[in-house]
Each structure stands twice: as structure tokens, then as C-alpha cells.
Amino acid sequence: MLDPKRFLTALKNMGVDEYVFAAKDGPTLAELKKTVLSCERCPLASTRKNVVFGEGDPKAAIVFVGEAPGEEEDNQGRPFVGRAGKLLDQLIERIGIKRSDVFICNVLKCRPPGNRDPEPREVASCKEYLLSQLDIIRPRIICTLGRHAYNTLLEVDVPITRIRGKMTVFRGTPLLPTYHPSYLLRSQNKIKDAWEDMETLKEMLRGR
Ligand code: URA
């Protein structure tokens, strides 16, 4: 058994002055994805075409969290690839980064039929996957899209108009709630608020 004190001293002598202790008890993102792809925890397993685990940089500084896959996402097994996805891509570009630089996922990993709101039992079944994704990626900032993602993570029930743009902290990570891109497609007058939020994310990434 290695003496921890001597081990740390040895690291220091080798010039290592910063280290991260990685707990080896949780799954990797790839392992989690494998589990989620075969999930049958709720009835959406029987109506989905594809599980939409999420995609992007596993070491992303920003994780965007949406509500649930829509029809196009269900068809392709990828998040935000429909009209709302195109708008999300534009929002991400305003931060000065690319879609592939962030990680994008949803509260629900399977499409609710007809794009209805997620049901509480579906959220209850799926939330653990989202929490694990955030635990594994450990982003610098979480950006929730719309009220469902915010209310699910914070375990509250507040309208998006009340909290949008107001920074909070989720389990030690700064969290910025903004509007859902689908809502922005219907309410173009709100887009400047979303741009403002992207500006906030940009400044946070710069460490301001
Ligand atoms: N809306 C969402 O909330 N998520 C998607 O992936 C697509 C549309």
C-alpha cells in the first residue's frame, strides 16, 4: 500500500503542483450512454424511435439542457437538430464558440408522443441520467433552456419569465436559465434577451 503523503511529496518533487483526484466509482460518459440507450424505465421506451442521449464535448465548459426530444431528434437520435436546434446553433455562435465545443442534452432522453409536456413520472425516471451527465462532464456553466429544465434541476415550479437571465447555482455550478429556442421561434421579440444571456455566458467563459 502506497503511503499517500510520500506519494504526494513524490509528485511535488516531479514538478506536479496540481492534480485532480478522479473517483473511480462512477461511470464514464460512454458507459452511461450505453446504459441510457437501452433504458426501459418508463413507457416512452415503447413509443420512441431512438434514445437521444445528448452530444458534444465530454469536457465541455458549458452544458445546455433542453426539455425533451422532438420528432426530428427522435428520428435522428440527436438533440436539437430541428428548427429549434438551428436557432440554438445560432445562439451558441453568439458566444463565439461552436456547437461541438458544448454539450447538449435534455431532461428526457425519449420523445413524449406528440411533443406533449414531460410527465412527472417520466422526469422522475430520467432525471438521474441528467444528473450523472452533469457529474461526469463537470461543466463550468449550465445553461437551461426553458422552464422544464430549470424547474427539474432546481426542483421548483416557476415561470421562465421570472427567472430567465438570473444566474443561480446548482450543486456548486453556476446555472443560467434562458428561453427555450422553440419559444423564441414563436416569440421573436424575446430573442434579444436570449442574446443578452449568450453575452453573459461569453463573459463568464472569459472569466469576467
Ligand atoms: N426541444 C428540446 O427541448 N430538445 C430537443 O432536443 C429538441 C427540441
Image (spheres, rainbow, N blue to C red):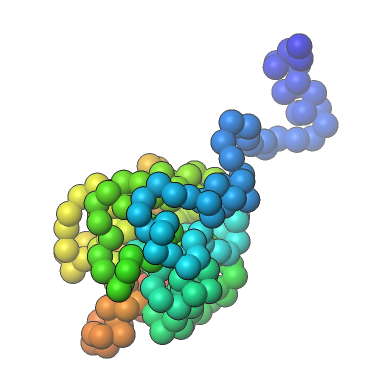
Front residue of 171/69: it is 69
Front residue of 49/177: it is 49
Q: Quadrant of the C terminus?
A: bottom left
Q: Quadrant of ligand 1?
A: bottom left
Relative to 146, does residue 25 appear above or below in the rendering?
above
The answer to whether residue 146 of the structure is visible from this angle is yes
Q: Measured from the top left, where is residue 126 in percent x and y?
A: 38, 50
Q: Measured from the top left, where is residue 12 in percent x and y?
A: 76, 28
Residue 189 located left or right of residue 37: left
- Residue positioned most to the bottom: 188
Q: Quadrant of the N terminus?
A: top right
Relative to 94, does residue 165 appear above or below in the rendering?
above
Front residue of 155/208: it is 155
Q: Measured from the top left, where is residue 154 in percent x and y?
A: 28, 49
Residue 143 located left or right of residue 60: left
The answer to whether residue 94 of the structure is visible from this angle is no
- Residue positioned most to the right: 14
Front residue of 4/102: it is 102
Q: Measured from the top left, where is residue 178 in percent x and y?
A: 31, 68
Residue at image position (29%, 57%) is 150
Residue at image position (30%, 73%) is 114
Residue at image position (75%, 35%) is 16
Residue 98, picture quadrant:
bottom right
- Residue positioned most to the front: 46
Residue at image position (46%, 73%) is 73
